[in-house]
Amino acid sequence: MVVRTSSSPSTPAEALEAVRRAAPLTQCITNAVVTNFTANALLALGAAPAMCDIPGEAGMFAGIAGGVLVNLGTPTAEQRDAAREAVVAGTPWVLDPVAVGALPVRTALAHELLASRPAVIRGNASEILALAGTGAGGRGVDATDSPDDARDAAVALAGRTGATVAVSGEIDLIVDADREARIVGGSALLTQVTGGGCALGAAMAAFAAVTAPFEAAVAASTVWAAASERAALSSRGPGSFAVAFLDELAALRPDDLEARAGGDR
């Protein structure tokens, strides 16, 4: 497990440097559609992915991981039990409440897991509204609301759970009990690659291994925006973009993020 200290990184550039230095073990209990892309994105970022989602092992593994992702995209019975084990291990963990509100099994599980105090909750606006109890969810995994629509719900959810809440969208909104940030930029091609958002949740878990939750969410969103913009410049469509995005994640340097500093208000 990576131990964070009082001198933990405070900027995206510092956080990226810390991830590259520590290569934090990042456990992903995630959906079956995105495991490969998520693992490759974490490797490109500089983290060490582990798709350990078997009951009887998940809790044990979470105890040695630096960060944990619980993604509810395909919550089989085994994954549900694995998630329950992992979130009580004491390791910073990220909840990605995929399609919550629209479907009953994952909605009940998401509310149950909230009691174990996620470090970060990352979702689209419709998912955050539903999790906060002020919306019915989106169209399956797709949002029908904007991050600004979900701002008040995100603030309330952060206050109730103690988590940082990251609302993904055209402009990412990140809030905790005291702060707010907006991350501008990124390519719309990310929405045409299966796993673009799910892998962002995994990146937040990796960053949460080396810095505080709010800074982890801001760093991951900043990195995703920067790498996706660069990838779009050399892509002909979603297929080439997915490959280019991994390449740009790996090529991204802390210095590249300095110009994007800021966003808190």
Image (cartoon, rainbow, N blue to C red):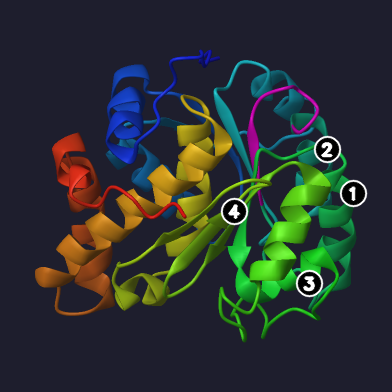
- For mark 3, what is the residue? 130
Residue 10 in the image: x percent, y percent? 40, 31
Question: Is 89 displayed left or right of 44 in the figure?
Answer: right
Question: Residue 161 in the image: x percent, y percent?
Answer: 80, 45
| Chain-order first, disc 3 or disc 1 | 1
Left or right: 152, with 248 as reference point: right
| Relative vertical location of residue 231 with respect to residue 125 in this rendering, above or below | above
Q: Which of the two marks, 4 or 1, is nearer to us in this view?
A: 4
Question: Mark 4 or mark 1, which has the lower sequence index?
Answer: 1
Label drawn at residue 84: 2
Q: Which mark is residue 175?
A: 4
Query: Would residue 243 be found to the left or right of residue 162 on screen?
Result: left
Residue 184: quarter of image: bottom left
In front: mark 3 or mark 1? 3
The residue where tag 1 is placed is: 112
| Label 2 secondary element | helix
x%, y% of residue 190?
A: 36, 70
Dominant secondary structure of the magenta stretch?
loop
> Residue 172 in magenta?
no
Q: Could you give the CA–CA distance between mark 4 and mark 1, rounded to whole angstroms?
A: 22 Å
Amino acid at dot 3: Ala
| Residue occupying the point 74% across, 31% down | 86
- Residue 75 visible in image: no
